[in-house]
Amino acid sequence: MVKHKGIVIAVILTCFVIIVAGVWGIVSFVMTGIAPFTKSVAVIEVKGVIADSEEIIKQIKEYKENSNVAAVVLRVNSPGGSAAASQEIYEELKKLAKEKILVVSMGDVAASGGYYISVAADFIYANPATTTGSIGVIAEMLNIEEALNHLGIKGIVIKSGKFKDTFSPLRPMTEEERVFLQEYIDDIFHQFVKDVADGRKLPESEIIKIADGRIITGQQALKLKLIDGLGNMEDAIDKAAELAGIEGKPNVIYPEKKRPSLLSILLSEVRGGLSERISDRNFRAEYRMIP
């Protein structure tokens, strides 16, 4: 009797596990569109100027923790942007690449910070005419002293130290300020060169030769060993599947398309205009290609 009771309990528990697994599978499929236990290739897109890393890092972590994702394709179409944001994305991509296959597909432009984040990958594809390279750092500021004088406006600054208003648009930069800012930029530049050299497994001396801000084509980048192959997005997906050991045509998870609101479009236009350059007093080093 006890024996039969144990068998009944075992059968009930087995059925319960099967039901829970089935429900989980259905919920997972409804939420992600992916059948459970299906090894997939996920796509992350980096488009436009890199101003913030939060959304991209969120996607990277999501796919890193998703057991159904065996590989990630990073689609880069960016001239770069904030040095710090580019570094944050690069570091998270390195963590991802330790656990899953990471392949980059470069679009029209993957330059400066757009190239920086790419070197975390196992394999980099570019189109022959892709604009890439632009390894370097830039920081800009305005001097509007003459314009204000013309309008009869004079600025007054009270400061605690001689360098506190270094970025003031109200006066010319001193030579001493220019020297220490150049040292600041050079330090961030060498961080860029080191990470590119590490990512591409090349000596820093080779990277320095072309790290003068110049842009290059995808075809030139291949000759310089800055990328691994010429190909498009489909080639990158196939390579990611191959490196991950996925047989046949892989299931691909594309990012959700978000329709921008009118407000976000207007704000974007304002940010990109002259008003931002005048009102934004923050001096920011950027891995960015100047169009």
Image (tube, grey):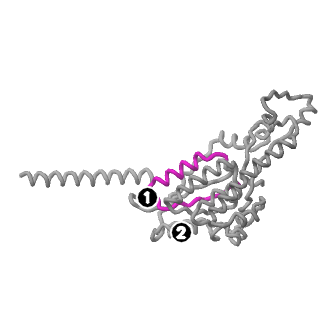
Residue 34 coordinates in the image, percent (x, y): 43, 57
Task: Mark 1 or mark 2: name the one nearer the start of the chain.
Answer: 1
Q: Is residue 82 left or right of residue 14?
A: right
User: Can you identify the residue that label 1 sits on?
Assistant: 68
Q: Return the mark for residue 238.
A: 2
- Mark 1 residue type: Asn
Task: Please determine whether, in this image, residue 98 is positioned above or below residue 272.
Answer: below
In which image quadrant can residue 122 be found? Answer: bottom right
As helix, strand or loop, the secondary structure at mark 1 comes to loop
Residue at x 59% of width, y 66% of height? 123
Residue at x 73% of width, y 54% of height? 189
Q: Is residue 176 left or right of residue 16?
A: right
Label 1 crowd (10 A; few <14 / some 14-19 / many >=20): some
Which residues are the magenta region?
A: 51-79
Residue at x 89% of width, y 28% of height? 154
Q: Is residue 86 left or right of residue 1?
A: right
Residue 64 coordinates in the image, percent (x, y): 49, 54
Q: Return the mark for residue 277.
A: none
